Image: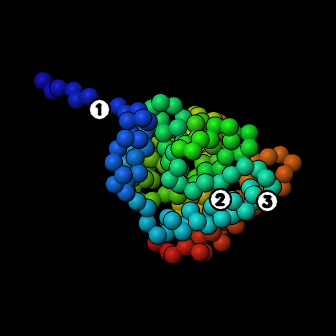
Amino acid sequence: MAMATAVPRYTAAEVRRFPDDRLRYEVIRGDLVVSPAPGTRHQLAVVELVTALKAHVDARGLGIVLPGPFEVEFTGDSAVQPDVLVILTDRLHRLTDKRLNGAPSLGVEVVSYSNKRTDRLQKRQLYLEEGVPDYWIVDTELRHVERWRPGADTPEVLDRSLVWEPVVGVAPLTLDVQALFRELPHP
């Protein structure tokens, strides 16, 4: 007779006590997710996105843009570190020196080989269930952005431009997706 082995469950507080060993530790609904440090293409995409988003958000006084790793704690058993996050002014009260408590206004994950499944399934489900209004999965190999919004069964797949309008009545950001990927080395 086979014995069932219990899978350990973690809390955000437990994961924070892990050693700083250049690995990214996250917890999603109690499941531990460990990712190695990202590569060059990944980081270049993050820089391009932070630059474009920050210029837009700052020029309009909409809030702040942070590059990852920066912790977002949704619940006691769910804390992640998006590659890029935007916190609009209506959510800034949830920001502390150490983390954001609750959903950012925009969460962005740049897909790496080691985290494709996590970004597309676990994180997507978590972000949307916890009220993130816009979640982007940036795929540097396929050279497109998958945009998810609450209630959607499928993403918008954008390979030319992405229009982000976080505040109605404020000029939106139009991100040239082709230009974003033109700056990155090919896989």
Judging depth in this view, the residue of 117 and 24 nearest the camera is 24
Q: Could you tell whether 23 is left or right of 140 in the image? A: left
Which residue lies under the disc numbered 1? Answer: 7
Please count the marks in the image.
Answer: 3
- SS class of the residue under badge 2? strand
- SS class of the residue under badge 3? helix
Query: Which tag, 3 or 1, sits closer to the chain's start?
Result: 1
Residue 159 sits above or below residue 60 on the image:
below
For the residues marked 3 and 1, what is the alpha-carbon distance in whole angstroms?
A: 47 Å
Look at the numbered discs 3 and 1 and tell me whether their residues touch, using CB distance below 8 Å. no
Judging depth in this view, the residue of 127 and 105 nearest the camera is 105
The spot of residue 58 in percent (x, y) is 75, 57
Q: Of the numbered discs in the image, which one, if any, rests on residue 59?
A: 3
Disc number lying in front (3 or 2): 3
For the residues marked 2 and 1, what is the alpha-carbon distance in whole angstroms?
A: 38 Å
The spot of residue 186 in percent (x, y) is 50, 75
- SS class of the residue under badge 1? loop
